[in-house]
Amino acid sequence: MNVLLVDDDVTLLSSLRRGLHAEGISTTEAHDGPEGLALAEAGRFDVIVLDVMLPGRNGYQVCADIRARGDDTPILMLTAKDGEWDEAEGLDTGADDWVTKPFSYPVLVARLRALARRHGGRDGQPFTVGDLHIDPGARRVSQRGRPVSLTAREFDVLEFLGRRPGLVLSKGQILDAVWDQAWDGDPNVVEVYVSRLRRALGSTAVETVRGVGYRLADVADDQGPPT
């Protein structure tokens, strides 16, 4: 696994480098936003770790720039700040996961491995649900023949729902499957991703069953994006 670390804390970078190398994970490092963005554009990484408070260009901006060019490499954001609005802003710009400093090192490694595994280690045949064509191997989605751009985490949520058509899946089931046991954040993060899928696929693409959970609708008649 090859990880891009973007943080202006030299001491933290040195600690992460030693720890990750001991786990067999290679690293490339950047110390500010512009340098991190340039490396992300030039290289191929399994996961990008972004600090929020970066000189030159903050982590939110770098994350948004990476997503704007169609790069779905998993992004894990680090911050010393603690609050739901910070997390929501990170997720809204396209981040896939979030860790608040100080963090548990084993949990961070588990999160990195889970993100890389889901993004690059899947096999599977393409399948169709309603007007969605989902290709797990290539990690591509099209709706009515037109490609839909999703982040790595958005794709994982959609695939999990899509493989269980008609079933109502609880937040807990989605968290266990997509975020795994290492997730210790707010379970309402599922709502954030359901909302983002609705924006990408149409407002009725994912149905809410009150008090139970969510299911992927038969979206063949949905008139939302990308018509």
Image (cartoon, rainbow, N blue to C red):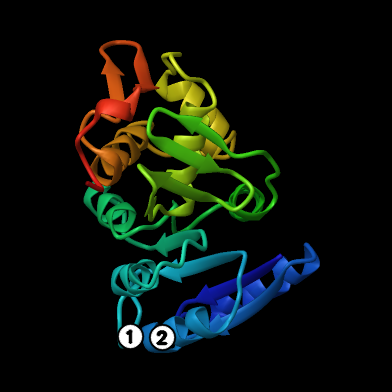
Q: Is residue 175 visible?
A: no
In the drawing, does residue 207 fall left or right of residue 173?
Answer: left
Three-letter amino acid code at disc 1? Answer: Pro
In this rendering, the answer to whether 53 lies above or below 73 is: below
Occupied quadrant, residue 112: bottom right
The tag earlier along the polypeptide, 1 or 2, is 2
Q: Which residue is mark 1?
A: 55
Location of residue 128 in the rendering, given as x and y in whole percent from the top left corner: 50, 32
Dot 2 falls on a residue whose secondary structure is loop
Q: Nearer the viewer, residue 180 or 52?
A: 180
Occupied quadrant, residue 44: bottom right
In this rendering, the answer to whether 100 lies above or below 20 is: above
Location of residue 154 in the rendering, given as x and y in whole percent from the top left corner: 42, 45
Three-letter amino acid code at disc 2? Answer: Asp
Q: Which residue is mark 2?
A: 32
Counting the numbered discs, the total is 2
Which image quarter holds the N terminus?
bottom right
